Every structure is written in structure tokens, then in C-alpha cells.
Amino acid sequence: MGDLLTTNSRVCKILICDDDAIMGRVIGDTLVSSFLSETVVTRNAFDAVATLKREKFDILVTDILLPRMDGIELIIEARRLDLPPKIVAYSGGGSLGKFAGGPSFLEIARALGADWAFPRQDVTTALVNLAVQGQLTPERDGPSADEQTPST
């Protein structure tokens, strides 16, 4: 099980962005202890963008609700890179006009370029499942059109 996130004998590089230091560490520890991967954790989207411009990452895992620059803006910036990472977004909830039927933050993240989007409480389990299924390797393009994204 220790080599599920390797490709061509290369460790999978994962950038995690969450302003909650504990959550960022839990995600990073889960991926490092379960699979052979290298993780970098940033606490804000500005640092994440700078890190993505300096280094190549295979996967970006980001919270949506971040101060100053949110995860949606981070997703847009990451998609502008020459070699963008696969993106996993997560959120504890929220939407634009929830009572008026507006889209959830997770739906917006998917529409703007996230490959996968999950509720915050499910993200570590979802990441492990994606890795076990071989979907977090750099060779795979994101989910197929028929894969469903849970909404909050």
C-alpha cells in the first residue's frame, strides 16, 4: 500500500491549502502515512499560488473558505498554469443564495476547474479512496463526466 501515489518511481507531490493548521496537517499526515507522497501545506491561497508558480505539483488539495483570497480564486489561478495540477476542493458548506437555489461552493469549484469536490468531513476518506482507485496519479485526467460530486 505504500506505493499507491508513485508514478514511474516518482513520489507524487501534493500541495494542501487550508487556513486551519490542524486540518491541513491531518490531510497531509493521512496522505504521507498511507501512501508514498510528498506534501507541502500552505495556510493561505496567496502562498499556495506562489508555491505553485515555483514548483510543479501533481495535486492541489484546497479548502474553499479561506481568508482574503478564497479557494475558488486559487482554483482559477492553478488552472492558468502551463502544467496545472489535478485539483481536489473541499468545503464545510455554503452556497450562493442557498435559499434561492443557488449553487453550492462545491458545485462552483467543479464548474471552475476542480477535478473533485467533497464536503469537509469526507475529504480525508475521499482522498484515500481516490488514491486506492489510482485516480490521484499524474497520468490520469480527472473524473469522467458521469462521476458524481456530493454537494452540501
Image: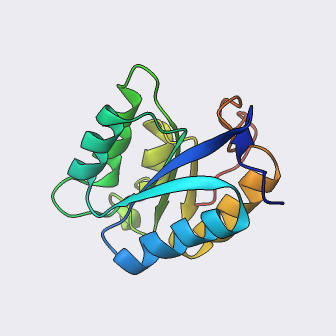
Colouring chosen for the image of the structure: rainbow
Q: In the image, is 87 to the left or to the right of 47? A: right
Q: Residue at x 57, y 41 (%)?
A: 115
Q: Residue at x 35, y 38 (%)?
A: 52
In the rendered image, residue 117, in percent from the top left (x then y), is placed at 55, 53
Please indicate, yes or no, whether residue 152 appears anywhere in the rendered image.
no
Q: For residue 12, what is the image quadrant?
A: top right
Q: In the image, is 142 to the left or to the right of 105? A: right
Rendered position, 138 above or below 89: above
Determine the residue located farthest toward the left in the rendered image. Answer: 68
Please indicate, yes or no, whether residue 91 appears anywhere in the rendered image.
yes
Rendered position, 1 above or below 51: below
Q: Quadrant of the N terminus?
A: bottom right
In this orientation, which residue lies closer to the viewer: 62 or 108?
A: 62
Q: Residue at x 54, y 45 (%)?
A: 13
Determine the residue located farthest toward the front in the rendered image. Answer: 9
Determine the residue located farthest toward the bottom in the rendered image. Answer: 22
Rendered position, 129 above or below 58: below
In the rendered image, residue 145, in percent from the top left (x then y), is placed at 70, 33
In the rendered image, residue 89, in percent from the top left (x then y), is placed at 49, 54
Rendered position, 42 above or below 125: above
In the rendered image, residue 77, in percent from the top left (x then y), is placed at 31, 35
